[in-house]
Image (cartoon, rainbow, N blue to C red):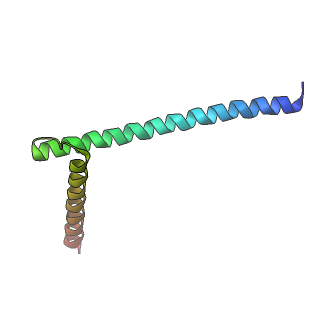
Amino acid sequence: MNTGLILTAIATITFIVLVYMFVKQLMKLIAILLTMFIIFAGYVYIKNGSLPGDINGYLNEGKIALQQLHQGLNTFIQSKK
């Protein structure tokens, strides 16, 4: 059998395995992001009693949450000094 053909077959199989591994990792990342969004939506629902009607509402709530997190972190750092 031709050596070039064998190497091509090995390279093709390796490529397919690598694409499979990449897709598997990508699906894990998507699952983590969706879980984080669900947790954030639950936080917004508990805080406001309802969910925002559009994406801008989520963005505004995210900005508020980040500001509160930053403020809390600064307070924590100041209390340790």
Within the image, what quadrant is residue 4 found in? top right
Q: Pick the residue in front: 66 or 50.
A: 50
Q: Is residue 78 above or below residue 40?
A: below
Residue 58 at x, y percent in the picture: 23, 48
Name the residue furthest right: 1
State left or right for residue 21 relative to residue 34.
Answer: right
Specify whether 48 is left or right of 62.
Answer: left
Q: Residue at x 22, y 44 (%)?
A: 54
2 vs 81, nearest the viewer: 2
Quarter where residue 31 is shown: top left
Give the residue at x 22% y 42%.
Answer: 41
**Along the horizontal axis of the image, is 80 left or right of 8?**
left
The residue shown at (45%, 35%) is: 27
Picture layout, residue 20 above or below residue 73:
above
Task: Locate the N terminus and report the quarter of the image it occupies.
Answer: top right
Q: Residue at x 15, y 42 (%)?
A: 45
Extreme-top residue of the structure: 1
| The quadrant where residue 13 appears | top right
Residue 68 is situated, as x and y percent measured from the top left of the image, at 19, 60
On-image quarter of the C terminus: bottom left
